[in-house]
Amino acid sequence: MRYTLPALNSFKAFECVARHMSFVKAADELNLTPSALSYQIKTLEEQLQTQLFTRLNRMIELTDAGRLLLPGVESGLERFSEAVARVKGTGEDNVLVISTGPGTASKVIAPKVHRFIAANPEIELRISAGLKLVDFYRDGIDLGLRFGRGPYPGLHVDHLMDDHLTPVCSPQLAADIKKPEDLRNFMLLQEDSMATFPDAPSWKEWLTAAGVKNPDWSEKGLRFSQIDHAQEAAIEGTGVLLGRKILSAHDRRLGLLTAPFNLEIPATGHYMLVGLEKTFRKRKCVMFIEWIKAELEELCLS
């Protein structure tokens, strides 16, 4: 069958504008000038003999024809990409790229990732650790494993697990901590990665829950921007960290950290997987989702 279709680049331009609902943002992604992008869309509309976007005062929206065309274009571009990957021998379906924070990468994924690799030797797993939000269309990321609250507009979100906060320290320090008031005599390690959450709990909230009166002194201490760095300092005996239960579970199992008290307070954040809805259905992603859910469940029981 012979296909008479507009140029592929015009479909890419249409999909990008429809995704961003902005000619400026789409032009930036495609490395085009806005006028060049507008010309591509205009040419496509002329070839299809229908208008795809309604240009409003300060925004655009898809016409009925545009909404009808978009799903087929998205599906077609995805199938083109998969076919090219197979021809190039890159094994697209076997490469799985996970974006996550440094703490989750080092304290949750890395210690147990050998189990995923052993169970799924055909999947080439790549971990991209960082706090910067990613663009799932541009950055080659399959899934994001996040700890936070969201929201993530336009993305599919799979809630995995809540976390809780409790003091953790080296066993040597713990031997000298008998009651919550004793924490006044130790360096309290502060980590600021949760400070972006509204009403994020801190040492003051935990100490108040433990019955300590007027714990304003708890706001002082050694501060870290990343929780895994603060956790390493706690392991070395620098001080006591109000640690996340799941994030500290592996080090507690190894005997590097211990929790001197049973009291926990909600971290008000949770672990979640974020990405494009269609990506969640890919086999490689299904395998990772099942694995990480099982690992988090196990860590939660520690």
Image (cartoon, rainbow, N blue to C red):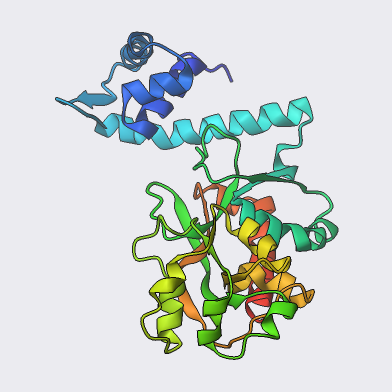
Q: From the viewer's side, name the closer residue of 247 and 36.
A: 247
Q: Is residue 161 left or right of residue 21?
A: right
Q: Is residue 99 left or right of residue 170?
A: left
Q: Is residue 11 left or right of residue 302?
A: left
Classify 14 as above or below 220.
Answer: above
Q: Position of residue 97 (x, y in %)?
A: 66, 44
Query: Which residue is pictured at 71% across the width and 42% down the height?
Result: 93
Q: Position of residue 118 (x, y in %)?
A: 85, 59
Q: Position of residue 55 (x, y in %)?
A: 20, 23
Q: Where's the N terminus, which quadrant?
A: top right
Residue most extreme to the front: 185
Classify 240 as above or below 176.
Answer: above
Query: Which residue is pictured at 31% across the width and 27% down the height?
Result: 22
Q: Quadrant of residue 139?
A: top right
Query: Which residue is pictured at 59% across the width and 51% down the height?
Result: 101
Q: Position of residue 205 (x, y in %)?
A: 41, 76
Q: Is residue 202 left or right of residue 174?
A: left
